[in-house]
Amino acid sequence: MPNPASSDLPAPATYSVDPTLGIVVDDVTGLTWQRDLTADLFDWNEAQDFCDALELAGHQDWRLPSRIELVTLVDFTRYAPAIDESAFPAAHVGESHWTSSAASLGENPDFAWQIDFWGGATGDGDVTTGYRARCVRGEPYTEPSERFTIAGSGSEERVRDTMTGLTWQGHETDGSGVSFTAAQEHCSDVSLDGGGWRVPSMKELQTLIVERTPNAVKLDAAFSLPDTSATLWFWTSSEYAELPDNGWRVNFGYGNAYFTPDTTIARVRCVR
């Protein structure tokens, strides 16, 4: 199965829709999605039970999607809803949807990741909160044990991600932060390995969130943070569709993703 995390990295998603069966196949990831939502709200456990019990299109192996799987459905060029309405026209797409991924933020274990399909933000929700559930089927992706390979050292360190095929700067050149526009200029000026570096998209940057490490910085040990006491927000190249002059950032202290004015100071890690 193609890697779910590769969706829109950076190619746009394409879908094969079967309205009769009520399913949507993502041509990039190979995952099959429930097309039409029910009007019900579920707490986190109820959402998982609902998908586990779902019988749709002749299949009974439906499940609640993981965080990165559900992120692949977000279309950051849209808002209200931030999803392809021709593929997913059902009501409630402008509301938050549960994922199967526990958030484990701070000292409270009773949170799980949810995606807000009004604008596309990734955040945590109390597991007792009522959100929507969109089920998926397909083999869950298992992260390889040796996911990252490192080359070079110091300012020339590069980290190759075997899961997505992307190569990242292993070290930031400046941890003090820059504006959204300056971040784009910074990466385009990086000359390492002949250039071609850029700011990662919203989906690309979210693939580096480490869900398996509760209560810790959500960035893999293969990457350095020069000053973990400073802000852990990192810019993406994705603009926020609803509000002019706003861009998307990812926070690697908690792992959430949100938009902010493009004059805000945040850090940047380039990719190619």
Image (cartoon, rainbow, N blue to C red):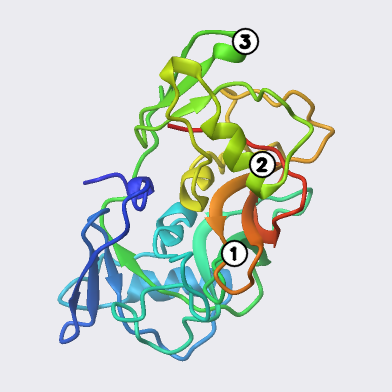
Question: With respect to residue 155, does 188 lie above or below?
Answer: below
Q: At numbered mark 3, what does the secondary structure look like: helix, strand or loop?
A: helix
User: Can residue 32 be seen in the rendering of this structure?
Assistant: yes
Mark nearer the viewer, 1 or 3: 3
Q: Nearer the viewer, residue 102 or 231?
A: 231
- The residue under the point 21% across, 46% down is 1
Q: Nearer the viewer, residue 118 or 219?
A: 118
Quarter assignment of residue 240: bottom right
Residue, disc 3: 154
Specify whether 74 is left or right of 61.
Answer: right
Q: At numbered mark 1, what does the secondary structure look like: helix, strand or loop?
A: loop
Q: Earlier in the sequence, mark 3 or mark 2?
A: 3
Q: CA distance from mark 3 to mark 2?
A: 22 Å
Residue, disc 1: 121
* Mark 1–mark 2 CB contact (< 8 Å): no
- The residue under the point 36% across, 28% down is 162
Q: Position of residue 110 (x, y in %)?
A: 69, 60
Which image quadrant: the C terminus? top left
Q: Earlier in the sequence, mark 1 or mark 2?
A: 1
Total count of labels: 3
Q: CA distance from mark 1 to mark 2?
A: 23 Å
The circle on residue 182 is 2
Mark nearer the viewer, 1 or 2: 2
Q: Amino acid at mark 3?
A: Gly
Question: With respect to residue 172, does 184 lie above or below?
Answer: below
Specify whether 7 is left or right of 269.
Answer: left
Q: Position of residue 197 (x, y in %)?
A: 47, 31
- Residue sitting farthest toward the top: 153
